[in-house]
Amino acid sequence: MFLVGLSGAFLAQSPAPGAWSQFRGDTRLTGVAAGAPPGTLKLLWTYETGNEPIDSSAAIVDGSVYVGSGTGDLVALDLETGKLRWKYAAGNPIVESSPAVARDTVFVGDSGGILHAVRTRDGSRLWTFETESEIKSSPVVAGTVVLAGSYDGRLYALDAATGRKRWVFEADGPVHATPAVQNGVVYLAGCDESFRAISLADGKEIFRIPAGANTAASPLIVGDRAYFGTFNNEVLAIDLRARKIVWRYENPDRQFPYYSSAALAAGRVVVGSRDKLVHAIDAADGKNAWTFTTRARVDSSAAVAGAHIYIGSSDGRLYVIDATTGEKRWEFDTGAALTASPAIAGGKVVIGSNDGVVYCFG
């Protein structure tokens, strides 16, 4: 591992209210937006990154949209117009790792295993840090620390200003999912069939719970509960105080893995599945509230704004669903699979497609 391009002081601040600063919107990975877009959406602009897929979900901060592409470019776009502000060449495809923005810096990982820290003002490199395998996990900034998982089986905690290692946690398999952070604890679901709580201060494991299956989904943290889906076709709810699984949900009719990360809406855990359905599960007891049918698998993770759920499907459509009833309120057909997740801020919804196009609705 090596480090290049060190810089001066980093001031860790929370982004402006209403921003969508990272994958799932915040460090607890809630997927909940601060404000709602218009009731009826219309296409405002598109931006073509190239012919490679966009699996990376957008971040929106201070009027700029940051999106990674399979072309290897991190682009900054004007939220109002979609015009290019700058382009940063990572040197390797940016696959599922989604940008995270803390004051003046955007962080993103690439398929070559490099975590990039880029200045938001002009797209210039601040520093890079190289792991030993690809990065699909999205970085998370907590205070002055940036967390990043790698397929080398490690979760890295780096100084956000310099990229120097604070600590490294060794998992028993690739770290695919994005870590969640709450009250100084890092929560990680992994490809080693484990759900872990890790101290943000020193990287020491606090507890581990066997999940019974590998998971690529990132955990949703709400109070004393964590929720995530697994490759064993289940969604789990974990009591973080009691340190045990309190319920398991499984579609009784169709057994397919969950790749989508969960959100909480109207007291229900909302998650997409490769069974072509969006599931709403009662957060208290794990009972099904409703399902919404798409035309292909749903790897996109839901965003929640007001009374509506926004989610993409590999059928190429962005759906708006009533959070209470599960009824469709609106859809837009992009013509290409949507595996990235929607980001919502400033009254707008942004999502990238698998034919390399960024869409903005409002």
Image: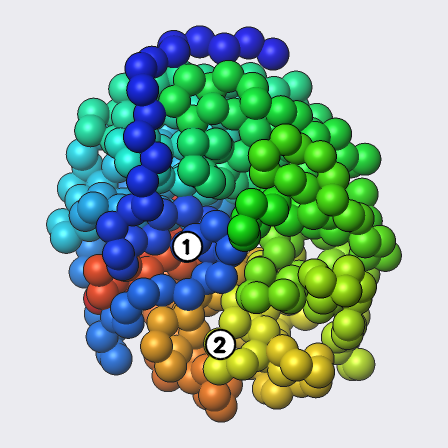
The location of residue 145, given as percent across then percent down, is 48, 32
89 horizontally vs 265: left or right: left
Nearer to us in this view, 311 or 18: 18
For the residue carrying disc 1, how many other residues have a C-alpha within 10 Å: few (<14), some (14-19), or many (20+)? Answer: many
Quarter of the image containing the C terminus? bottom left
- Is 154 located above or below residue 139 in the figure? above
The kind of secondary structure element at disc 2 is: strand
Mark number for residue 112? none
Mark 1 lies on residue:
25
- Residue at the spot 38% in from the left edge and 10% down from the top edge: 5
Q: Amino acid at mark 2?
A: Ala
Distance (Cα) linking label 2 and label 1: 14 Å
- Is 57 located above or below residue 163 in the figure? below
- Is 77 located above or below residue 39 in the figure? above
For the residue carrying disc 2, how many other residues have a C-alpha within 10 Å: few (<14), some (14-19), or many (20+)? Answer: many
47 horizontally vs 229: left or right: left
Can you see residue 112? no
Nearer to us in this view, 323 or 354: 323
The number of callouts visible is: 2
- Residue at the spot 79% in from the left edge and 48% down from the top edge: 208
Mark 2 lies on residue:
265
Q: Amino acid at mark 1?
A: Gly
- Residue at the spot 74% in from the left edge and 29% down from the top edge: 170
Nearer to us in this view, 249 or 10: 10
